[in-house]
Image (cartoon, coloured by chain):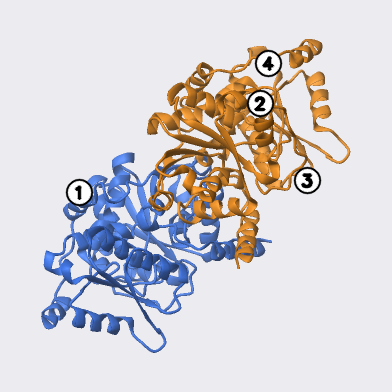
Chain colours: A orange, B blue
Amino acid sequence: MSSTSSSAQTATPVLPTADDVRAAAERLRGVAHRTPVMTSRTLDERLGASVYFKCENLQRGGAFKFRGAYNAVSRLSDQERARGVLAYSSGNHAQAVALTGRLLGVRTAIVMPDDAPTSKVEGTRGYGAEVILYDKHTQSREELAAQLRQERAMTLIPPYDHADVVAGQGTAALELFEETGPLDALLAPCGGGGLLSGSALAAGAVSPGCRVIGVEPELADDATRSFHTGSLQTVHNPATIADGLRTPSLGRITFPLVRAHAAGMRTVSEAAIVEAMRFLWTRMKMVVEPSGAVPLAALLADPGAFRGMRIGVIISGGNVDLASACRLFADGEGGAA
Amino acid sequence: MSSTSSSAQTATPVLPTADDVRAAAERLRGVAHRTPVMTSRTLDERLGASVYFKCENLQRGGAFKFRGAYNAVSRLSDQERARGVLAYSSGNHAQAVALTGRLLGVRTAIVMPDDAPTSKVEGTRGYGAEVILYDKHTQSREELAAQLRQERAMTLIPPYDHADVVAGQGTAALELFEETGPLDALLAPCGGGGLLSGSALAAGAVSPGCRVIGVEPELADDATRSFHTGSLQTVHNPATIADGLRTPSLGRITFPLVRAHAAGMRTVSEAAIVEAMRFLWTRMKMVVEPSGAVPLAALLADPGAFRGMRIGVIISGGNVDLASACRLFADGEGGAA
């Protein structure tokens, strides 16, 4: 069993298609929130463009991650469900898998570092998951997860490099296009590339002329380099405030999808991310986490590139503790003075 | 002219009705945002109730005040419009009148204290208003406004004690009921009573069994005392963080409306207001100013009183600068420790 799955790991992966995104949308109907699309006259006047924000900070669990997790778990066999699912994440994917497990009656175990914020550990436990803490200086979460898979025969739900996860993430863009019609550009944050890949699949099917652009922090520009060089580049523990985008690289599924379907990549500075957060919080009255503000940062940094366009922006999540956000805003003010 | 208007001031005022609220809704159609109604599973489970938030923090200008200001100015004659309108406010009403003036092509002058936050002065000027600063230690804004009315023959748009302003504010509740159907209770913050009065008129017409409850800070409990004693009570510069509710008393129009149509009044502590803000920011991902969190504070403080009910809550606004909000959250954490 484990050797089969390990040989499957090295074979060429089967990539999801736009039909898989549509099928995921059916599975998520009535389960995921159909999140609102927001606009800002102030922003549109400033950019000379029309921007449509798909507000996944208002998704269940506070981030788009619920879409992919629910889609993946709901496709498991009864036997797999009975054995439970496993994830390693200290962020939004952990809560998404835990919430999915509660909704589908599937036992969940989440491997988290023992220095994860208490709020995230409590949030994950609050959804009924078993939280397994590890010391990231002495233990490898991959090894720990492998051990749990072997001992308990649980199914691992990876955060992005999985066809069903990618297809689920694409449903946010699908909903956005249903409301806006075709767009000239669609900007999504890029960490492991699940959201970007899924969004590009959706755009290709329903808004073929739309340029899908991934945005990541300058400090974590691995996907930009991978996109331009054609070979998989990595970063190691990048110090960006966009904690959702600190993933080391694109994945075996997301890299070819991004190369095939994204029109470009952009990077933004840390200061630009804080400025975009400030706009979203004060002008649009929305709590958005640093990763979720990254695409708007790209728009604000280079408005000339988007003038006259109709632009979709995926706001990926809103899970940030207030003390951390307040420190960012205070530092930003100090820096601006 | 000024003696006529001064004798009108002392006559029994004509009170607005539910029909005036409906007429205001027609005037505001396509001009005011039809703001979204949000819910929270977490909150509903905690309270054992169903709560529907009408999100006026997402209204134009960031608060419900635009509804009343626009309704009032749009009812002026061509001659009155040509002479311009005047308001005194350092808060949301100032920006609402300024924005209305820009939309209707009416000149606006706003009297503001010279220690008002720069962001609010700039925001008001940004909408094209003339800002007239005064020293609140040596000048009376009422006298200054009276002088301007005389010199320029401008029409004063008061922040709450005006039939057209009250009727405009009631349109938020009207929209809420259109989405939710009849409710058991509706909670609105109460400063001068414009929003509460208008909401009560709307409820009486479309959800007659609904108990409309005004909520104010314990530190600014004038309306609660007025409601219970039947005589107009006042407060003087209350030190509440809910800056929108620091008004000295109900008005000549709003007091009789609140007495006749509200079912009750509640007061909340400053700590409860911060707790409610924290819930709205972190769990519902919405930036809400202290005044806007006051009704939720009443629900969280006494959940037993609302168990099993369907409850509407008007979130009145989201205009708060991040530095001030961050200080409140930091103090709240210190206090809880």
> Relative to B117, is B65 on the left or the right?
left
Report how many numbered discs are placed on residues in the image: 4
Given the image, on which type of amino acid does mark 2 rest?
A: Phe
Which of marks 3 and 2 precedes in the sequence? Answer: 3
The chain ID associated with circle 4 is: A
Quadrant housing residue A237 = top right
Residue A255's disc number? 2
> Relative to B85, is A213 on the left or the right?
right
What is the residue that sits farthest to the bottom in this orientation? B138
Which of marks 3 and 4 precedes in the sequence? Answer: 4
Which of marks 4 and 2 precedes in the sequence? Answer: 4
Q: CA distance from mark 4 to mark 1?
A: 57 Å
The chain ID associated with circle 2 is: A
Using the rendered image, report if marks 2 and 3 lie on a common chain. yes
| Residue located at (46% from left, 54% from top) | B296
In what quadrant of the picture does the N terminus of chain B appear? bottom left
Residue A13's disc number? 4
Using the image as rendered, state which of residue A82 and residue B136 is in the foreground.
B136
Using the rendered image, report if marks 1 and 3 lie on a common chain. no
